[in-house]
Amino acid sequence: MARQYRTDIDGLRAIAILGVVLYHAGLKQMSGGYAGVDVFFVISGYLIGGNILDDLAAKRFTFRKFYTRRARRILPALIVMVLAVMGLGWVTLMPDTYRYMGGAAVTALLSLSNVWFLTRIDYFNPDASQDPLIHTWSLGVEEQFYLVIPLLLLLLWRWRPALILPVLLGLIGLSLAVALLTSGEYRMQAFYLLHTRAWELLAGVIVAWAERNRPLPRALHAPLYGAGLILILTGLWLVPPAAPWPGIWTLPAVLGTALILAAPQAPRALQMPLINPPMRFIGLISYSLYLWQQPVITLSRAANIWPDTLAGLALVLALMVALATLSWRFVEQPFRRPGPLPKFKPRLALAGALTTLAIAIGGGITEGYPARMPSEVLAVLDMRQSFSPSYRRCIYVRAQVPGFDPDSSCTFGPDPAPSVLLWGDSHGARLAEPLGKALAEQGRGMRQLTLSSCLPVPGLIIPGQNRARQCPVFNARVLTYLADHPEITDVVLFATWKSYLFDVTGPDMLGRWGEDGFYVAPEDSPDMRDRAGREAGFVQALARQLRAIAPGRRITLVLPVPRPDVDIPRHFATRLWWGGDLPKRAGYDRAIYDTLGTPMRALFDRAIAAADLPEGTLTLVDPASIFCDTAQCDTIRDGRLLFSDGNHPSLPGLALFVPAITGAITGAIPANR
């Protein structure tokens, strides 16, 4: 007997997709909007699990029927969206992004895009996170789940149906435990892969099993339904910054969705937030809306036409809904109707998939079809490679820290035992070779010890990072190395300090603020929520470090380069591509940098005062005094781009302040203390 269609599930889908869309569109007050994906996972588990259980009970389950239905549900709209994005990307995306998008497109059709993005979103490929197809990772997780759950339920049903519940509960407990244990330290693996997401989908399967075998007493439906609504809203609005995901804060959205699904007989008045016509409509088009929201947002930003006003944002959201409605009506529905498909429809889908593959292969071979762009645009884009040959070879990443040997790190200059140590993050790594060459001209040798995205101060941790604990391990080892090598007489500390110190990002050079959640805290208090406490912890840790380094050494402390936080080569290449020009000088309001630059400088002044170093020990170099005047911080000077992305200085940018550092080391610039 067919089960009654539940209109409130459409409303649940609407809540899920609205959370995702508003979060991606920039409504950061909805701090957990991405939990909408987790709501979708529970719904999918419930519907798919219920369908399998019903078919098994009726002895009509076949794998062919199951996967045909899944393919008709997922692939047509996905293929159309991917082809449209490839067409629009041709006139909006730079070659490197277009090339990576091709890989995302193929893996999306193969249900592997979650694995693709896991292996591509790393330190050396930050642009992957701007891929218009990155949202397809969740489809990969679901489709991989669909490979497992039918076989599991079929085997249990035929062998011993009584084991279905304990096996599902055991798998939920195992998957959740793995997520909780790994999502803090291995954030990307936990976020993207099935084994840490399976508990969410299985929660829906459990509800479907209970509905058919152990339904809840009717008296519980109303309170559980109400509790479910509250939990979902909590999961969307109250997630703290940098919360490991999936983790403890994923539970409200998952549990809330499960409670609503388990209580179908709740009073109609309680269901009204979900079953009203607008919510039902959004729910009906939610799959297509999910497919289209990320491309609209990403391609608009790539073309520099993302709106800055509420009216403009409303127009973009209306465009998303319109595209989703067309996709739902003319792509989803024709393929989902019961019965055999006309032969031309599968052929169209196959042709679309093959076209996607061909475009992606061509993009890989040509590195993104650069011939579609004028040579002057490509010349500007080439500045994204404006870093020294040793940069990638000499910077450490977290996976290397357990076997890290400071004596095997890169050195520059003539000294067999270098007397200068450069200690920093990727910004320090960009500085290394230009500084090493400048010191070599003075007869000095330098050793480079740099770890990507790691503030070079022992005793601190960035709790929102993947393998976060490798950073304090690295820094402690560097400090030990210094203690064992008195021949090092000068230490240079350089990092993009400002981005670590505050729990906000921005404002960028256009005045826009970004996401919260990337900040340092004391290693022994990684969950510290109090900003003043974290800042005090930084001041104490830096002062302690300066005192530990100082005996018998000079310290050059280099403050951060003023970050535009907008990809400068991409920004001006797009401007050229769309008919603009490349100015001889360009920049942004100095006040934008000072918004966080001034309080950052105050923290350094506090730390230096607390260290109380002997006179002549420390020199403070501030690149802001070189990149900025009283009115403007430059991004282009004398026709040369000073940044190779949104924050790293290019070789011309580094050349501006390397002399100040070498002067501090050689004594040409007097020490401040």
Image (spheres, rainbow, N blue to C red):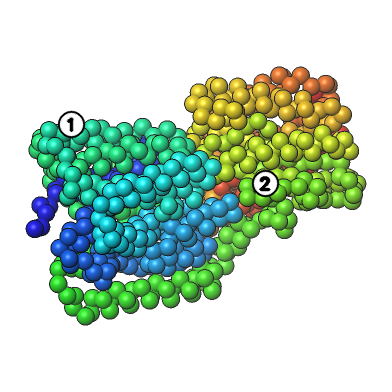
**Quarter occupied by residue 620:** top right
Q: How many marks?
A: 2
- For residue 606, above or below residue 477: above
- Residue 91, image x, y percentages: 42, 64
Amino acid at the residue labelled 2: Val
Task: Indicate left or right for 613 with 603 as reference.
Answer: right
Does residue 325 show up? no
Determine the residue positioned at 60% across, 34% down.
461
Residue topped by disc 2 = 401
Amino acid at the residue labelled 1: Pro
- Rate crowding at label 2 as few (under 14), some (14 to 19) or many (20 or more) other CA atoms within 10 Å: some
Determine the residue positioned at 63% across, 27% down.
538
Residue topped by disc 1 = 223
Q: Secondary structure at mark 1?
A: helix
- Residue 666, image x, y percentages: 86, 37
Q: Which is more foreground, mark 2 or mark 1?
A: 1
Q: Nearer the viewer, residue 651 or 123?
A: 123
Looking at the image, is mark 2 or mark 1 earlier in the sequence?
1
Q: Nearer the viewer, residue 391 or 229?
A: 229
- Where's the C terminus, which quadrant? top right
- Residue 1, image x, y percentages: 8, 58
- Residue 409, image x, y percentages: 77, 50
Q: Secondary structure at mark 2?
A: helix
Determine the residue positioned at 83% across, 41% down.
420
**Quarter occupied by residue 488:** top right
Task: Indicate left or right for 256 with 263 as reference.
Answer: right
- For residue 390, above or below residue 472: below
Does residue 403 show up? yes
Contact flag, marks 2 and 1 (Cβ < 8 Å): no
Cα gap from disc 2 to disc 1, whole angstroms = 51 Å
